[in-house]
Structures are given as C-alpha cells and as structure tokens.
Amino acid sequence: MSTSYLTEKITKALAQGRKAVMPYLPAGYPTKEAFWKHIDDLDAAGADIIEIGVPFSDPVADGPVVEQAALCCLEQNVNLAWILEELHRRRPTIQAGIVLMGYMNPFLQYGMDKLARDAARAGVNGLIIADLPLEESNGPRKLLQEHGVDLIPLVGLNSSPERLRAHAEEATGFVYFVSVMGTTGVREALPEQLQDALTQAKQIFPIPLALGFGLHAPSQLQGVESVVDGVVMGSALIRHIDSTGSVGSFLAPWIDSQ
C-alpha cells in the first residue's frame, strides 16, 4: 500500500522538528469570497493540512462557535457541490493537504459513490465523518479508498483499547484524537487523563496522531508533546477571524513555538 498523502504531510512536518499544523474552517465562512482568501492565507502561512468543514444544521460534535459559523454558511447556501467545484478550480495552487470534515446526512444526500469520485477530482485527501460509527464505516471507506481518499477515524478519552485496535486495523492518513468529552470549543485546560489516553493510542496506531477540540495555545500541549504529531484548531481560528477580519498570524505561534 502506498503512503497516504496526509501521512506524508505530517511526516514532513515532524522531520522539520515541529508538529503538523491543521487549521479548521467551515466552508464559506465568513463569506464565500473571504473563505477562499483565508484558505490561501492559511496555506501560505504554512498549514500542513487544512480541514474544510461541510456546514450542517445539526452538528452534534460542534460547540457554539463552530455551530454558529456553520449556520452563517448555510444562510449563504453553501453546499457540498459548491465546495467541491470551487475546490477543484483552486486546488492546483494550494500546497496543504485537504480534509473535508462533516456529517453523514449531507454526504448521503450527495451520494457516497459520487462524493468519492468528486472529492478525488477536487483534490480532497481525506474525509472526517463525525457521526459515522466504526461498525458502519466499511462501505464508505472502501469507496473513498478506491479513489485515494482516506477516511480519518475519530477517537477519544472514552475509546477502549479494543476499540482503538479495531480502528487501527483500517485507519489510513492519520487518527484524530478528541481531547475532551464534549463538543468543539476553546478550553482553558485539557483533561488530566489526556496524557495517558494519548500514550495508549500512540502505542496502538501505526499512523500519526493529531489532537483536536479545545486547542487555542501551544502551551496546552505541555505534557503531551512527545505523543502528538499534529494539532487541529477550529473555534480559536474562527474567533481570530471574527476579531481581526483575517487569519493574519494565527498560525505563527503554533509553528514558531515548536
């Protein structure tokens, strides 16, 4: 099996002595035009992988900041067809890996087979489907893999060793570790049991481990630096855009501090 493009992007960052930086932004936020400018700016600022959120009206894994941003995008009629068509046109100039993060409802409405084809055509390297159970993931995974697109597993503090091993048997690209028991959103401190949980997952998964949910500052990684290969920031980035109107130097602390 060839190495995943997403794995390669993370491995390259690690070889540079830093963790892979993975900003998340809902597609079309804050406006359709500004969104693509922000993607270009994040790419130019050194993002290794950019996660593009597919707006959905019932985002059970998202906290209030991401949920409100997604609703803003839906009010502008952002949908999967628009995302993939615009991405196809713009992808040749984007260096970062691209991951779509969303929920089964929009993907099923679009059609999983069509989604796999169109996502590959648009240069999508991976999908995160927050409400897709492991037991129902084989069909979507095989469709995506036929087109070279990884299905990224979500695991967390309540994932048992048996569950982690089951995910690890099929996982490609990287594994997304949810840092908290709850929805997305900035936290001042991460759970005390996170270090042990990450260490356990690191021993089980043969692919890179990315940490997301609640991150807003590199200092939060104290104690888990050695087991985390990448970091995902969503709510903190949206707040930064809301307050400054641009992504500006948002990524700099994450890249310069490592």
Image: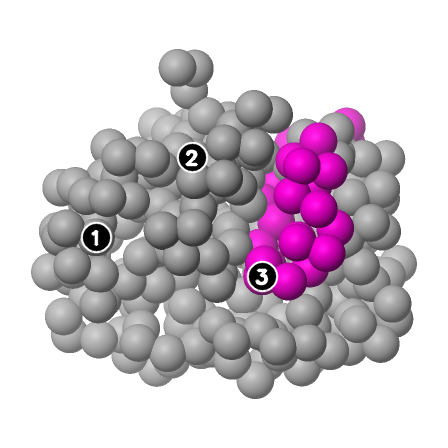
For residue 255, above or below residue 66: above
The percent position of residue 160, horizontal first and vertical second, equals: 16, 59
Tell which tag, 2 or 3, sits nearer the viewer.
3
Q: Amino acid at mark 3?
A: Tyr
* Quadrant in the picture for residue 24: bottom right
Say which mark, if any, is on residue 173.
Answer: 2
Kindly tell me whether residue 252 is visible in this rendering. no
Q: Amino acid at mark 1?
A: Arg
Q: Report the front residue among 245 and 36.
A: 36
Q: Earlier in the sequence, mark 2 or mark 3?
A: 3
Q: Residues within 10 Å of mark 1 (few under 14, many from 20)?
A: few
Is 94 colored magenta in this rendering?
yes
Q: Which residue is mark 3?
A: 103
Q: CA distance from mark 1 to mark 3?
A: 21 Å
Kindly tell me whether residue 81 is visible in this rendering. yes
- Tell me which residue sits at (72%, 56%) in the image: 109
The percent position of residue 228, horizontal first and vertical second, equals: 27, 49
* Quadrant in the picture for residue 246: bottom right
Q: Which residue is mark 1?
A: 163
Contact, mark 2 vs mark 3 (Cβ under 8 Å): no
For residue 235, above or below residue 91: below
- Tell me which residue sits at (78%, 44%) in the image: 84
* Quadrant in the picture for residue 65: bottom right
Q: CA distance from mark 1 to mark 2?
A: 18 Å
Q: Residues within 10 Å of mark 3 (few under 14, many from 20)?
A: many
Magenta residues (range): 92-117
Residue 150 appears left or right of 35? left
The percent position of residue 235, horizontal first and vertical second, equals: 54, 72
Quick one: SS at disc 2?
A: loop
Residue 210 appears left or right of 194? right
